[in-house]
Image: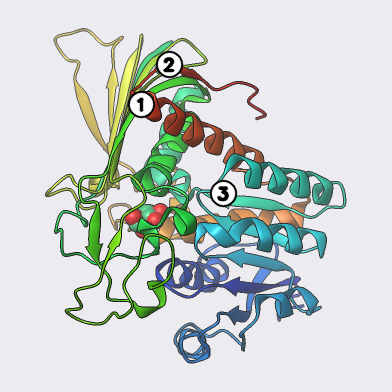
């Protein structure tokens, strides 16, 4: 219990790198800015590198440190397991945590394969019957402008949706000397730009439209196939034959994932859709673009201008019509009331707080949060269909049996 008499929910977070930092801040801020029905407690951070885990604990206020994530599952003071590790560990940790009766938040993509994702869904469904909740971290759903876009579609403001245009554009891999990391190894990351950022834009398109992709025709490419290895821990893993590594090392390792993916698709409501995910779009840093055209109007969003949603009402007389640049910072816009007065814009990290708030609220209220593991599984099927299609130079590949 907290001072105000609210129940506390102990969080055990696994991983402390980029995502671990974003999540740490979110768990801290959720109680400060939102009137949550249960208060997240930063109970423990777990990681194999004890010094790094301790540093994270000190910086963000985690109460304790574990060097083996399994310890978190044995602790009675931990209610939520937050998985911020590379994709190859998601299935094992999530299934074990759910079986131990812990609620789970798992970073995206849900897993590295459809088979792993399916096992996770089964564990999530069995756990849900006992009141244990699970959620996958497609965090961009909770950017206020995106949540507002969803609301406009739900209200019928776009009419019948006919086009979906999605792109997730980054450029951090353009330099061929940029080193090999786990994100470029299939065995660790599952896929490249496709799963890392393509998964986000596919999820966003499905979330905002309320429809699903029914099939894909896709191409993928790896523009730089070998990169220098500066992280000694990667030597000996697949595709890296060298024996030594270090700064300026001549050891090079194979990139075993895609650098970019493009796909055309159909949506379940009849719309035609195109998607692009790349780490080679020079000048684009984290540009998540979504444009949706309906018979009554259109929406356009770019994360690099994330407080804005461009809205076009096609029912207005053509003399006055056009895209309106809506600043999504009003208290009546989703999530905004928790923060600042109008015009005091939000940033990348705020959506992680919204995610934490929604998860603890669902746990406290006994509802199933979205995006669910089933949502993550369905995206996983699409990623797999993209790879199958790309192997056959873009042949049409249906996505059957969606579960959501
Ligand atoms: C790296 O490409 C990355 O951090 C992704 O892993 C995140 O999901 C995305 O939000 C930003 O880019």
Given residues 329 and 369, the one toward you in this image is: 369
Q: Which mark is residue 396?
A: 2
* Residue at x 51% of width, y 51% of height: 108
Residue pushed farthest right?
130
Residue 242: x %, y % from top left: 31, 72
The reply to whether discs 3 and 2 touch (Cβ–Cβ < 8 Å) is no
Would you call the spot at circle 2 few (<14 residues within 10 Å), some (14-19), or many (20 or more)?
some
Q: Reading the chain from its start, which is encountered first: label 1 or label 3? A: 3
Which part of the image, by quadrant, shows the C terminus? top right
Given residues 280 and 151, the one toward you in this image is: 280
* Residue at x 65% of width, y 81% of height: 68
Q: Quadrant of residue 233?
A: bottom left
* Residue at x 61% of width, y 85% of height: 67
Name the front one of labels 3 and 2.
2
Q: CA distance from mark 3 to mark 2?
A: 24 Å
The secondary element bearing badge 3 is classed as loop
Q: Reading the chain from its start, which is encountered first: label 1 or label 2? A: 1
| Residue hosting label 3 | 110
Q: Is residue 62 left or right of residue 320?
A: right
The reply to whether discs 1 and 3 touch (Cβ–Cβ < 8 Å) is no
Would you call the spot at circle 1 few (<14 residues within 10 Å), some (14-19), or many (20 or more)?
many
């Amino acid at each position: 219990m907290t001072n105000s008499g609210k129940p506390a929910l102990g969080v055990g977070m696994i991983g402390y790198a980029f995502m671990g930092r974003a999540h740490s801040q979110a768990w801290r801020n959720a109680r400060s800015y939102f009137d949550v029905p249960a208060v997240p407690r930063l109970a423990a951070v777990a990681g194999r590198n004890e010094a790094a885990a301790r540093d994270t604990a000190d910086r963000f206020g985690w109460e304790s440190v574990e060097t083996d994530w399994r310890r978190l599952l044995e602790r009675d003071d931990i209610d939520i397991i937050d998985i911020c590790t590379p994709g190859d560990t998601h299935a094992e940790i999530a299934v074990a945590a759910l079986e131990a009766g812990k609620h789970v938040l798992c970073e995206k993509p849900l897993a590295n394969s459809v088979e792993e994702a399916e096992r996770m869904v089964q564990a999530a469904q069995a756990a849900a019957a006992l009141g244990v909740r699970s959620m996958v971290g497609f965090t961009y759903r909770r950017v206020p402008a995106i949540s507002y876009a969803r609301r406009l579609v739900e209200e019928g403001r776009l009419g019948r949706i006919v086009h979906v245009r999605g792109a997730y554009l980054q450029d951090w891999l353009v330099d061929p000397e940029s080193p090999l990391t786990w994100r470029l190894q299939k065995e660790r990351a599952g896929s490249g730009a496709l799963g890392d950022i393509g998964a986000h834009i596919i999820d966003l398109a499905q979330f905002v439209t309320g429809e699903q992709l029914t099939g894909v025709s896709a191409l993928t490419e790896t523009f730089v196939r070998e990169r220098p290895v500066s992280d000694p821990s990667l030597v000996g893993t697949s595709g890296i034959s060298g024996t030594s590594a270090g700064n300026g090392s001549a050891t090079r390792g194979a990139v075993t994932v895609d650098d970019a993916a493009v796909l055309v698709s159909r949506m379940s409501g009849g719309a035609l859709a195109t998607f692009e995910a790349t780490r080679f779009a020079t000048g684009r840093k984290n540009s998540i673009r979504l444009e949706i055209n309906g018979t009554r109007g259109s929406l356009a969003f770019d994360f690099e201008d994330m407080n804005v949603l461009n809205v076009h009402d096609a029912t207005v007389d053509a003399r006055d019509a056009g895209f309106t640049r809506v600043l999504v910072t009003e208290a009546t816009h989703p999530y905004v009331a928790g923060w600042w007065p109008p015009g005091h814009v939000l940033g990348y990290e705020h959506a992680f707080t919204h995610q934490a708030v929604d998860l603890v609220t669902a746990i406290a209220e006994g509802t199933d949060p979205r995006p669910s593991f089933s949502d993550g599984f369905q995206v996983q099927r699409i990623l797999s269909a993209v790879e199958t299609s790309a192997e056959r130079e873009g042949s049409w590949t249906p996505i059957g049996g969606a579960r959501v």
